[in-house]
Amino acid sequence: MRFELFRDSAGGWRWRLRSQNGNVVADSAEAYVRREDCEHGISLVKGSATAPTVDMTLKIA
């Protein structure tokens, strides 16, 4: 897997995470004005490996 850091058509910074087969499995969903902020977003995703999985189908609406 790899993170790709790029500029969108409006000039904002974005990231996406691609699997080895080339499919995008996650993306930033928003543009960042500063590259450093985009890189920080990547760091947050990398650091979330210990985040719990919550089954929302078991939650009462």
Image (spheres, rainbow, N blue to C red):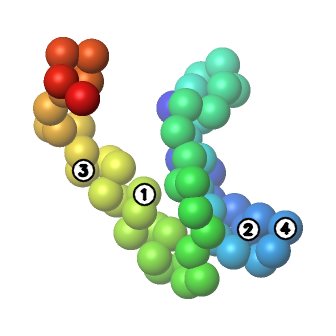
Q: Which residue is mark 1?
A: 42
Quadrant of residue 17 in the image? Answer: top right
Residue that appears at 34% across and 59% down: 43
Q: Give the residue at x 15% y 32%.
A: 52
At a point 35% along the width and 49% down the height, the residue shown is 45
Alpha carbons under labels 2 and 4: distance apart: 7 Å
- On screen, residue 2 versus residue 50, left or right, reads right
- Residue 1 disc label: none
- The three-letter amino acid code for the residue at tag 1 is Ile
Residue at the farthest front position: 61
Q: Which amino acid does the dot numbered 3 rest on? A: Gly
**Dot placed on the residue nearer the N-terminal end, 4 or 3:** 4
Please state the horizontal and vertical placement of residue 25, each as a whole percent of the image: 55, 31
Q: Amino acid at mark 2?
A: Arg
30 sits left or right of 7 in the view: left
What residue did someone put label 3 on? 47
Can residue 53 be seen by looking at this rendering? no
Please tell me which of labels 2 and 3 falls first in the chain. 2
Judging by the rendered image, the residue that carries numbered circle 4 is 9
Q: Are marks 4 and 1 in contact (CB under 8 Å)?
A: no
Give the crowd class for mark 3: few <14, some 14-19, many >=20 residues within 10 Å: few
Q: Identify the residue under disc 2.
A: 7
Q: CA distance from mark 2 to mark 1?
A: 14 Å
Q: In this rendered view, identify the residue nearer to me: 10 or 56.
A: 56
Circle 4 Cα neighbour tier, 10 Å, few/some/many (<14 / 14–19 / ≥20): few
Camera-side residue of 8 and 61: 61
